[in-house]
Amino acid sequence: MDKKPGPRKSGGSKWCSVVGCSNHSGQKQYRFFNFPAESRYKEQRQLWIQAVRRKNPDGTPWIPSKNAVVCSEHFVSKCPVRYYRNHPDFVPSI
């Protein structure tokens, strides 16, 4: 089981929100992407939340903070796509 409690920042680094991923912004080989804005991309945001498979310690659903990110390693083309629902990178899948 993943012991990392959730996305964290340390020394200015952002950590990937995906369960089991330990990539952080201090590693220059990765890019990091914020979760889609709820006001504009509600469906896509919910799909991203499901894809990261994270729960709070008490079992309640995890809600990403405004600083939560997903790294490029979880997208087929290493970059998310916002407008094409059928594109493989509409949701992190790796």
Image (cartoon, helix red, strand yellow):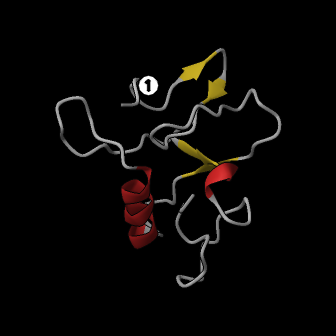
Q: Is residue 56 above or below residue 78?
A: above
Q: Quadrant of residue 63?
A: top left
Q: In screen coordinates, is 35 left or right of 50?
A: right
Q: Amino acid at mark 1?
A: Lys
Q: Residue at x 17, y 31 (%)?
A: 58
Q: Quadrant of residue 55?
A: top left
Q: In screen coordinates, is 24 left or right of 27?
A: left
Looking at the image, the residue that sits furthest to the top is 11
Residue 76 locus on image (x, y percent): 68, 65
Q: Residue at x 39, y 23 (%)?
A: 3
Residue 82 locus on image (x, y percent): 60, 72
Q: Is residue 16 above or below residue 89?
A: above
Q: In screen coordinates, is 68 left or right of 42?
A: right
Residue 18 locus on image (x, y percent): 49, 44
27 or 35, which is in the foreground?
A: 27
The quarter of the image holding the N terminus is top left
Residue 28 locus on image (x, y percent): 82, 34
Q: Is residue 53 above or below residue 86?
A: above
The quarter of the image holding the C terminus is bottom right
Q: Residue at x 74, y 46 (%)?
A: 31
* Number of marks: 1
24 or 1, which is in the foreground?
A: 1
Which residue bears the numbered disc 1?
4
SS for dot 1 = loop
Mark 1 Cα shell of 10 Å, populated few (<14), some (14-19), many (≥20):
few
